[in-house]
Image: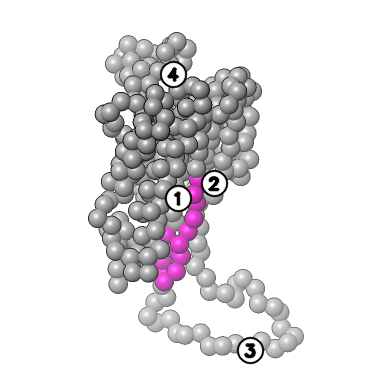
Amino acid sequence: MTSIFEKLIGKKRPAVSASAETPTLPMIERPADTAPITRRDIIHLDITHPSVGCAQSVGIQREHNEDALLAINTLLAGNGEYVPFGLFIVADGMGGHNQGEVASGLAVRTIASHVVRKAFLSLLNPKPDRPSESIQEILEAGLQEAHRQVMKEAPGSGTTLTAALVLDKQMSIAHVGDSRLYAITPDGETSVLTRDHSLVMRMMEMGQLSEKDAAIHPQRNVLYRALGQGEAFSPDITTSPLPTSGSLLLCSDGLWGVVPQEEISRIIKTYPDPQIAAQLLIDAANAAGGPDNISAILIHLPE
């Protein structure tokens, strides 16, 4: 029988079930003087899925917050299979006069509504049919709709947007701007899974600027690609296997721009509770001067 997960993304996942030789367990009457039933007496499916922490701050030098974030972390289990579903988004608005926060909030709500309707609700359909669109196409359509909405409702503004969609053992990333998604291994090795759409990043790629000089360049915050700016809009969208352990961090440049990568890694490695670690990351950014709004979503992956 085709599983719900296979219908959704077309990838077969082995179901966890008892073998044909396993006999049906009889009802057991326990004498009153025996020990109570414990967890060992119960046959169960070991279900694990990511744990998540979120934190945000206006920073020290800003008067209002133009960042927006969203974290949906849930699990569908039954019929011998379990499907983790997670949607995590960070957006950093720009434009002034409160337009930046309008842009980021509208973008997050628009793409989240589209993805939940097209992807997650398909899992809940009593008779699920495989969508006509792939996960990447769903993300692309959601971003394009968010782009149109921002241009319509908040003209002259814009926003970065970095989204991670976790579905079973796959992770799809949709990205535009200079918010980031990091992967951190259990031993603290850190890598950036997104590419900044910034002027200094392009200059670095062309060999015109060093990483050290980029960190202090006067135009380091200038983007050449952002959601809601210009008619042509092309996000980066990729799909890859979900890391089997470690952590994922989505954050705005208010965090990564002032806290060294080594310190980000140290905090995440030191504090296993993702909510505590996320708040400590925000605290570190404010301790470094807090020049911008700060947003972080930290996802700890099960071993």
Q: Residue at x 57, y 19 (%)?
A: 291
CB atoms of marks 1 and 2 within 8 Å: yes
Mark 2 vs mark 3, foreground winner is 2
Q: Position of 271 compared to 253: left or right?
A: right
Residue 252 sits above or below residue 142 on the image: above
Say which residue label 1 marks: 86
Magenta span includes 281 = no
Crowding at label 2, few (<14), some or many (≥20) Cα neighbours within 10 Å? many
Which residue is painted at 33% across and 35% down in the image?
Answer: 148
First in sequence: mark 1 vs mark 4: 1
Dot 2 lies on which element? strand
Give the amino acid type for the residue marked by disc 3 in the picture: Glu
- Name the front one of labels 1 and 3: 1
Q: Position of residue 279 (x, y in %)?
A: 62, 36
Marks 2, 4: nearer the viewer: 4
Which numbered dot is residue 221? 4
Report if residue 79 lies within the magenta region: yes
Amino acid type assigned to the residue bearing label 4 in the image = Asn
Q: Can you identify the residue that label 2 sits on?
A: 52
SS class, disc 1: strand
Q: Amino acid at mark 1?
A: Gly
Taking the spot 31% from the left edge, 38% from the top edge, the residue there is: 144
Q: Which mark is residue 29?
A: 3
Q: Residues within 10 Å of mark 4 (few under 14, many from 20)?
A: some
Mark in front: 4 vs 3:
4
